[in-house]
Amino acid sequence: MRATFEALAGRRVSVALMTSIGVTVHDSSYNRASQSHDWKRRAERLVRASGSDDTIVRPGRFDESAAAHPEPLFLQGDTRRTGSPEDDSVARSQIARVLIESVTAAAASRKTLELVAERGPRQPDLDPVFAALQADAEGALDAALDPNTLPLDREPAAFPAEIAEVARRGQSASAN
């Protein structure tokens, strides 16, 4: 993400970032072995620090059978965990739709959401669904309602400097 913002050279853009449900869970055996959630959380923090019009989407398990459940369910707080394929699934086409529509939906700006699908009608317009979400606080590095499971002082030593540099670039873009 840092390299992406460097390449943008201070230009303001809308960002749609996909990470994953469970990104705030740092003590799982999966994360201890891979550090995957820690890296995804760092990417989210860099996007928020950039000051961009961002939407961060944390999908559940990718499962094309979830297309039979066309109603998107937007959650916040990273409390839901994927279980069986029947629970917390979402089709790739649904993820793509949410990511694409989030770039142009004003109601999606500065929002972080967990995405799963449920039984119900296909939502023809995602704007009201985005609008119902709580926005991430301006200047905050973490999402609205997320647990504080990875304080900044527990990040690698170089990471706070990366955040500061991305934030500086974002502030200079806002001034232009």
Image (cartoon, rainbow, N blue to C red):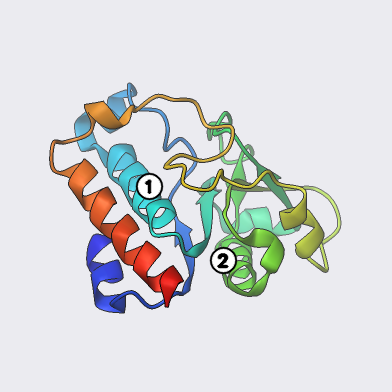
Viewer-closest of 51 and 115 = 51
Q: Residues within 10 Å of mark 2 (few under 14, many from 20)?
A: some
Q: How many marks?
A: 2
Residue 69 is at least partly visible in this image: no
Task: Identify which residue is drawn at 31% across, 65% down.
Answer: 169
Image spot of residue 165 (x, y percent): 24, 57
Quadrant where the image shows the C terminus: bottom left
What label does residue 30 carry, if any? none
Q: Image height check: is 26 above or below 165? A: above
Task: Identify which residue is drawn at 53% across, 50% down.
Answer: 59
Viewer-closest of 118 and 144 = 144
Image spot of residue 41 (x, y percent): 36, 42
**Marks 2 and 1, how far apart at CA:** 18 Å
CB under 8 Å between discs 2 and 1: no
Q: Which residue is mark 1?
A: 45
Task: Identify which residue is drawn at 19% across, 47% down.
Answer: 161
Identify the image quadrant of residue 157: top left
Residue at the front extreme?
175
Residue 18 is at least partly visible in this image: yes
Residue at the right extreme?
121
What type is the residue that disc 1 sits on? Arg
Image spot of residue 141 (x, y percent): 42, 42
Image spot of residue 73 (x, y percent): 71, 47
Quadrant where the image shows the N terminus: bottom left
Viewer-closest of 78 and 171 = 171
Mark 2 or mark 1, earlier in chain: 1
What type is the residue that disc 2 sits on? Leu
Callout in the foreground (2, 1): 1
User: Disc 1 on helix, strand or loop?
Assistant: helix
Relative side of 72 to 166, left or right: right
What label does residue 99 carry, if any? 2
Relative side of 105 to 3, left or right: right
